[in-house]
Amino acid sequence: MIATHAPAFSQTLPQSADYIRILPEIILSVFGMIVMVLEPLLDEETGQRLLGLIALVGTLAALGATWFMAQAPGLAFWNMVQVDGFSVFFHVLIIAIAAVVILSSYEYMAVQRIRAGEYYALILFGAVGMALMSSAIELVLIFIALEISSISSYVLAGFRRNEASSAESSLKYFLLGSFATAFFLYGVALMFGATGSTNIDQIGRTLVTGPIPLLAFVAVAFMFVGLGFKVAAAPFHIWTPDVYEGAPAPVVGFMSTAPKAAAFAVLLRVVFVVNVHDIFWVIWISAALSMTLGNLGALVQSNVKRLLAYSSIAHAGYLLMAFAATPALGTSAAMFYTAAYAAMNLGAFAVVSHFANSGERYVTLEDYEGLGRSSPLLAATLTIFLLSLIGIPMTGGFFAKFYVFSAAVKANLIWLTIIGVLNSGVGAYYYLRIIVMMYMRESRKEVPVTRVPIPLGLALAACLAATLYLGIFPNSVLQYAQDSAWQLVQPGPPETPVSALVSTLSESR
Amino acid sequence: MTAGAWSPYILTLVTFAPLLGGLLLILFPRRDRDIRVFALVVTLLTFVLSLHLPVYFLRGQTDFQYQVDKQWVSTPNIHYHMGVDGISLWLVVLTTFLTPLCVLISWKSIHGRVKEFFILLLILETALIGVFTSLDLFLFYFFWEATLIPMALLIGIFGHERKVYAAVKFFMYTMIGSVFMLAAILWLYAHTGSFDFVEIRDQIMSGTVPKFPAAAQWLFLGFFLAFAVKVPLFPFHTWLPDAHVEAPTAGSVLLAGVLLKMGTYGLLRFNLGLFPEQSRQNAPWVMTLALIGIIYGALVAMVQPNMKKLIAYSSVSHLGFVVLGIFSFTQAGLNGAMFVMLAHGISTGGLFMLAGILHERRHTYEISEFGGLASPMPVYAASYLVIVLASVGLPLLNGFIGEFLVLSGAFQDKAVYGILGATGIIWSAIYLLWMYQRVFFGKVAHPVNNSLSDLSGFEKVAIWPCAAVALVMGVAPILWLAAIDPAVQAALTPVAGVASRVVAP
């Protein structure tokens, strides 16, 4: 049962190409450390601005580095990291999310009087973990990356440290989160027991050869529990509303997009490369449950952050539909969905965090009354994000849902599709409620809305541009997703990646 | 450039001209007068552009004309495929005709947030035209959903007391109805590899779509539900009175005039076009629902104390005629259905404008608040009479032609349909004329009504074109039917084929 590792690589030292393949992670870590080192040396006033700027430069540099990374596809570090179209896609996505979050946190830090140093550093370190999750194909490395990203998120959730709700949020997230990661680790261990390997490609090749042992199925199911927690899929979603409610608003924007994208990336690899077919029903049920529970829960919320938390559960459900579909179509649909979801959700949370004001006082639905009159531009921006979350044409959310449903129908999942379309009909109601509050009600109390500062404006503009771009010209992104999905699920004959590595290695010598 | 050279671009131009105008309007400073003038110019320009369509339309041809077909997204295979035939042609023109009138009628009545109002109106116009011109199912669904938001916002922001309830109800009804259509469209794409209406239709006709016979009934229902909510057919109609009563006048005009036609157009184009066999099989209960709609709508309209609600229920009744005509599967019935769609757009649009004018002066729609208005407002009363008679179906006005054709089609199908349908005309005469009598005849019951001013210049310009078109349509229906008839014949061919297949073996 025990698979032999290619002996050539256990001896060699990492080559320069290996480092290029994790260049974005390296840059993010270096900048994170710079932020940590500089933080005590600067006074609070200049620190807030300068550290944010450094972190932003770090993310932009890392974004640039993904280009170099994309030029060097292949395996690195003894088959632990694989750079392909798929991982490049998620690198760009996650780092871009980090950049937008940093931009939208600028003002928030000042208003809420939060010391900025650790905050920015943690976002950068979190991004390192998430980025690494998307390119790691070694389950142990994935676990380490998952822990890096989770621990940053736990701390970030508790950053409004003089608020009890924030501490509660952090503690809940930590306790349940560690429980969930333990499940993941257990799944890894079982998988090793079943196949003798912890390398996803290797496992996939082992499992193709014979009947799939029950142990492998249980292993994938356990990993699904761990990752399902991270993406807030039902029935592992209970933590979401409480954590989102207490955590700082920009952090929620971050938590609801980047770690989810990373966890979905891992899940895609686990589900489609390992390809344990029986997991299909587990995903089917989880998808149907997430959509339904998320939407029903959101219907009765009066706090906008909780509402968006339930909505994120529902969106995890739509996304999981893609996992129940056929590999190639499902992967590309899921990739597109994560990108579109990131753009619209991040934008929505950026508006919410700006509007919440100091101490996050204004987060209930009633506070949004009359916003359409008092600050038309902000309200219009939020409206577009909400319409995109509903899935109205001209927005990224529309195409995202469309592709997912389309993939599901293609895979003959008619009932799941019907549950999905019905849910997206019901879901429209609660997003609409926010729009109704903003435009059709007059404000009954004085809610001060400050001017939108430039960094936040940039962040909003970026999200808006991405949402509309994906809604009107979805072709390029979708084409990219399809190409890389094809690479992912059809890796060719088993020897190809190894031989490709040999040739790159010999070139670099 | 000659007119012919314009042809490939004309549909794109007509469809997106209002949107472009709306986007330009965003940049405008908040000077209400300029905004109104600009909106009027844009909508008039769109109307003039759209006249290109009937002028250069090749009558007697059944193919889609002015087609453009460009790839928009490569996988899934989505095309920007636009084109019109005799059916959609007139619906486009109806839309572009009614929108400038909406701008005129809103000239004085919209005070706050004028800019938002006209931006939404222009966006709505683009979406409406797009629904009728798109031949790619994806594109169709895109525009279909796109009509929802501006309409819901128009009701919710500019409506009357219970506007929020009405807006949300309208949105949720149509949204939930149309997601089933989305599922059906996705199924068709998954099994044909195309969103193109013509392509899918040909594949279905040639019988090459896998698993189609098993799924056809569900697909038919998926499309049917979306359209039935929009029409609205009998059990799905409850959103309509609420939406109408709360909507601002321009919203009501477009809602009754054009939005409802999206449903009947969809039934005609997609249910009949793609699923002729299922249409045949389901016709009996669809016809029954249509008849219930005709009679029930009329009876409820009769007892309404609220003028706008009365007109709203009269729409339920009239649209029942359209569905009756479509599912009679006769040449006359379909011609009539098309003609009722257009006539109803004109006359009910006119009625809503007239009701809005009254509301502006008295801030109520209650019929009992009026009485004897003919003496303070003679011009208004005369205009109202023309439109009411058109709606009742008086010969020489447009309502008559359509209803006559529908009923003769229904008789050809089954006498009982015709007989029951014919009672609808009697009912409509009763409720409309009785309403007219209570509002206009007799002595002025409430002294406050003595000082009501007659139609203003803007209002005349908005109402009289409706009355004039109603007359022309009634006298010379051939101008419209010449284009409609061949298209309807083409739409009927597959259904007739099914019928002969059913009979022949």
Image (cartoon, rainbow, N blue to C red):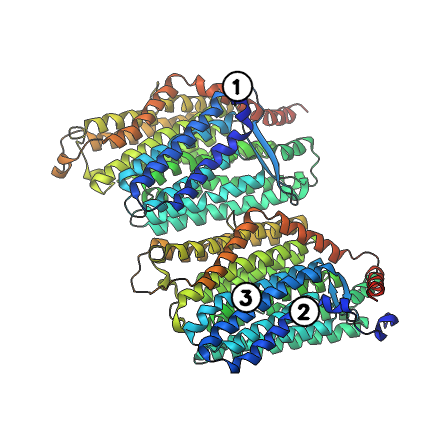
Chain letter of mark 1 equals: B
User: Percent x, y for residue B177?
Assistant: 49, 45
Residue type (three-letter) at the residue carrying disc 2? Leu
User: Percent x, y for residue B221?
Assistant: 55, 41
Q: CA distance from mark 3 to mark 1?
A: 57 Å
Chain letter of mark 2 equals: A
Q: CA distance from mark 2 to mark 1?
A: 64 Å
- Residue corresponding to mark 1: B59
Do tags 2 and 1 sit on the same chain? no
> In the rendered structure, are the residues bearing label 2 and label 1 in contact, judged by CB atoms less than 8 Å apart?
no
Relative to the observer, which residue lies in front, B93 or B22?
B22
Q: Residues within 10 Å of mark 1 (few under 14, many from 20)?
A: some
For the residue labelled by badge 3, is the local secondary structure a helix, a strand or a loop?
Answer: loop
Q: Residues within 10 Å of mark 2 (few under 14, many from 20)?
A: many
Q: Which mark is residue A132?
A: 2
Q: Earlier in the sequence, mark 3 or mark 2?
A: 2
Residue type (three-letter) at the residue carrying disc 3? Ser
For the residue labelled by badge 1, is the local secondary structure a helix, a strand or a loop?
Answer: loop
Residue type (three-letter) at the residue carrying disc 1? Arg
Do tags 3 and 2 sit on the same chain? yes
Give me the residue at 53% from left, 79% from top. A39
Give me the residue at 52% from left, 73% from top. A51
- Residue corresponding to mark 3: A256
Relative to the observer, which residue lies in front, B54 or B323?
B54
Q: Which mark is residue B383?
A: none
User: Percent x, y for residue A483?
Assistant: 71, 52
Q: Quadrant of the C terminus of chain B?
A: top right
